[in-house]
Image (cartoon, grey):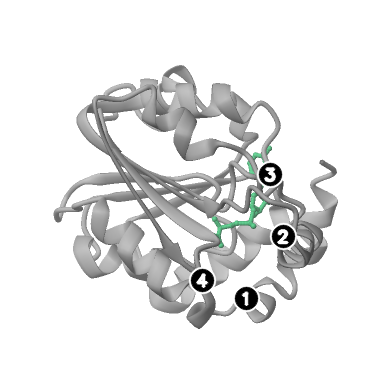
Amino acid sequence: MDISFYDRFSKVYDWLSPKWYYHKARSYAVQQLNLKPGQTILNLPCGTGQNFEYFQKYLKDSGLIIGIDLSPGMLNKAEIKIKRHEWSNIKVFRADARNICDKWLKSNIDNKIQVDALICDLGLSGFPEWQSIVDNMLELLSPNGTMVIMDWYLPKPSLRGAFIKWIGKGEVDRPIYQYLEKRVNQFRVNTTFNRGGVFVATAVK
Ligand SMILES: C[S@@+](CC[C@H](N)C(=O)[O-])C[C@H]1O[C@@H](n2cnc3c(N)ncnc32)[C@H](O)[C@@H]1O
């Protein structure tokens, strides 16, 4: 995937993917993270930072929110939100999801970093090598940390699936939550969002 597509998309992203559209799924997903003030959360990919306000509801400007994305355009929109709200606990980084691992975090953020919670929203359906990204995310998560994935799953070809794929450039039929389920001891999934097209899977390491 050419990341320049997302740079162009970033200009209209918050308009084409407005807050109300994923609000139920996002608020449920962030609730599942069980965030407490002072904790560290990693959001990959963070896009334009639509999740930040949901995290702050729990963190109340404390702890650390790490947002990672490969598109400078998306990150620019995220930075604008951070400045507008004067949020001081958010750091955003430009990086390829395939390179994010425990070693990357330690060398780019802090050698003693502990990630308490992790959310991959609308990313794994578009990432190449998505299975190894899930494995790396689980590896970098602290023991008892929570990982949440929010994404599309429409296994049967449909007009809706084709439209979502066209607009977001993601595959809508990847068995993402099924893959996660096999790798953890505690797992639950809610498949009821956006008329059954969007799932929120929660795993505790
Ligand atoms: C559909 S958007 C989702 C953004 C955000 N999570 C949200 O829910 O609004 C997909 C994001 O994945 C990012 N992306 C695509 N390929 C990537 C990669 N290889 N590494 C990191 N980010 C990537 C894009 O720049 C884009 O911001």
Q: Earlier in the sequence, mark 3 or mark 2?
A: 3
Q: Are marks 3 and 2 in contact (CB under 8 Å)?
A: no
Q: Is residue 72 above or below residue 110?
A: below
Circle 3 residue = 126
Circle 1 residue = 14
Taking the image as shown, residue 61 lies to the left or right of residue 131, namely: left
Secondary structure at numbered mark 1: helix
Question: Is ligand 1 less than 8 Å from the beta carbon at label 3?
Answer: yes
Name the amino acid, label 2: Gly
User: Residue 188 at what x, y percent from top left?
Assistant: 29, 43
Alpha-carbon span between mark 3 and mark 2: 13 Å
Circle 4 residue = 195
Q: Earlier in the sequence, mark 4 or mark 2?
A: 2
Query: Quadrant of the image for the C terminus?
Result: top left
Q: Is residue 83 above or below residue 148?
A: below
Alpha-carbon span between mark 4 and mark 3: 21 Å
Tell me the quarter of the picture where residue 111 sits. Answer: top left
Name the amino acid, label 1: Asp
Circle 2 residue = 161
Alpha-carbon span between mark 3 and mark 1: 18 Å
**Farthest-out residue, top:** 103
Please identify, in this view, whether the residue under mark 3 or under mark 2 is nearer the observer.
2
Which residue: 50% across, 79% down?
19
Q: Are marks 1 and 4 in contact (CB under 8 Å)?
A: no
Neighbourhood count class around disc 4 (C-alpha, 10 Å): few under 14, some 14–19, many 20 upward? few
Neighbourhood count class around disc 1 (C-alpha, 10 Å): few under 14, some 14–19, many 20 upward? some
Q: Are marks 4 and 3 in contact (CB under 8 Å)?
A: no
Name the amino acid, label 4: Arg
Q: Is residue 124 above or below residue 89?
A: above
